[in-house]
Amino acid sequence: MAKTIYVLNGPNLNMLGTREPDTYGSATLADVEKLCADTAAGFGLKADCRQSNREGELVDFIHEAYARKASGIVINAGAYSHTSIALHDALKAVQIPAVEVHISNVYAREEFRHHSFTAKAAFASLCGFGIEGYRLAIKGLAAKIGAAKSSATSPS
Ligand code: CA2
């Protein structure tokens, strides 16, 4: 059976593609989730994509990833990245290799976006690549967990 990775998106990311295109681009969350599913499939992985506007539900998704023996997590916790010790602790607790993604370059934005609790619990962090960051994160995660390119669906 295919290994599963969880792709977790946090608050307001359900609004992607509807507002603030200069900062977040014009792709929708559905586009992001398809990109993740396709990229993961290219490595023989299944992407289980979730979004929530609630911190506790994101914690629950991380616990679920552990219960279901997920091989990796890609997380864009949105604004909770900068505030949530609970998400940091959940990622640390489950010990699943995690990559943090931000669509925008948080370091070129307000100072309050420069610190990330989720980055401290992740093995890698990406920002500023737009939604391409999710593809890069999955490629890096695949390398980290030893998932080889699948001949059935090769990732671009
Ligand atoms: O750049 C990112 O991916 C962020 O995680 C996005 C968060 C922000 O709080 C982080 O500092 C950086 C905000 C997500 C808001 O998403 C929207 C998308 C379209 C329209 C409105 C909000």
Image: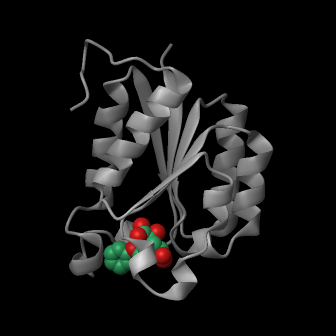
Between residue 89 and residue 143, name the one nearer to us.
143
Residue 14, position in %: x, y?
A: 39, 67
* Quadrant position of residue 70: top right
- Residue 112's place in the image compared with 52, above or below, is below
Residue 4 percent across, percent down from the top left: 52, 29
Q: Nearer the viewer, residue 120 or 14?
A: 120
Which residue is drawn at the image coordinates 70% and 50% (left, top)? 91
Residue 151 placement (x, y as % from top left):
26, 12
Q: Residue furthest front?
A: 107
Q: Residue at x 60, y 45 (%)?
A: 123
Residue 116 left/right relative to 50? right
In which quadrant of the rendered image does the C terminus lie? top left
Picture quadrant of residue 63: top right
Q: Position of residue 17 (x, y in %)?
A: 24, 69
Q: Quadrant of residue 103?
A: bottom left
Query: What coloring was used for the rendering?
Result: one colour
Q: Is residue 12 visible?
A: no
Look at the image and tell me whether residue 92 can be seen: yes
In percent of the image, x 25 and y 52: which residue is there?
A: 31
Residue at the spot 75% in from the left edge and 41% down from the top edge: 94
